[in-house]
Image: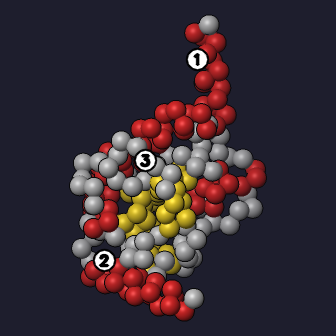
Amino acid sequence: MKNILIGILATFLLLGCSSKSDENKNIEPKLVVGKSLTDLNLKDQFGKEHSLNADTYKVIFAFDKEPAHTCNDFFNTQKPTYLQEHHVQFVADVSAAPSIIRSLFILPGLKDFKHIVLLLDDKNIAAPYRKGVDTTKIVVVTLLNKKITDIKTVSTKEKLQKEVEDDSAMSYIAPVINKVMDSVDNAAK
């Protein structure tokens, strides 16, 4: 009986992790320099809806298990406001995991973190964000007025920390510009 349950669980895992389907071939990638992330609206690990904060300068994406663990392990050692203070938001793609695995193991584990984790939990929504990027690494997207100005990949906690704690002049100016532009856009509506 135990072997049967293990076999069924392994089958679900293998079926849920196959992300190379043909239906994703005609999808237009979202993470491209010059494109806007204005429509990025995701739920966090507690089910609360989020869009990009007005002053967001960088968005960190973790598409696979290894980069997600690297990010969460690092962010969990920081104070709860660490990402906000650096104008960063974190997105983890959990869409490849079967829904039963997500609901029984992944989501309860994410609720233990003190930082906000925005979730890509639907394969169709995640596919355009995954397309054209190295999903085996942490993807760091830099924004100005919610438009992508740069995309980098990193693999280590040290490089992730350097990206988050960016001390360039732009890291101080961009959040202010982003907030002002967001106010102008909202006033025009």
Which residue in the protein does label 2 denote?
Answer: 171
Which residue in the protein does label 1 denote?
Answer: 6
Which image quarter is the C terminus in? bottom right
Element under disc 1: helix
x and y, in percent, of residue 153 in the image: 42, 60
Q: How is the image coloured?
A: secondary structure
The mark nearer the N terminus, 2 or 3, is 3
Q: Nearer the viewer, residue 143 or 138?
A: 143
x and y, in percent, of residue 188 in the image: 54, 92
Q: Where, by quadrant of the figure, is residue 53 drawn? A: bottom left
Q: Is residue 31 visible?
A: no
Which residue in the protein does label 3 denote?
Answer: 68
Q: Answer few, some or many: residues within 10 Å of disc 2's Cα (few below 14, many 20 plus, some between 14 and 19).
A: some
The mark nearer the N terminus, 3 or 1, is 1
x and y, in percent, of residue 132 in the image: 59, 61
Q: Residue at x 59, y 46 (%)?
A: 95
Q: Residue at x 61, y 37 (%)?
A: 98
Q: Residue at x 60, y 43 (%)?
A: 96
Q: CA distance from mark 3 to mark 1?
A: 25 Å
Q: Answer few, some or many: residues within 10 Å of disc 1's Cα (few below 14, many 20 plus, some between 14 and 19).
A: few
Left or right: residue 114 compared with residue 66: left
Q: CA distance from mark 2 to mark 3?
A: 24 Å
Element under disc 3: helix
Left or right: residue 119 compared with residue 28: left
Left or right: residue 113 compared with residue 183: left
Residue type, mark 3 in image? Ala
The mark nearer the N terminus, 2 or 1, is 1
Q: Nearer the viewer, residue 114 or 32?
A: 114
Residue type, mark 2 in image? Ser
Q: Answer few, some or many: residues within 10 Å of disc 3's Cα (few below 14, many 20 plus, some between 14 and 19).
A: many
Which image quarter is the N terminus in? top right
Residue type, mark 1 in image? Ile
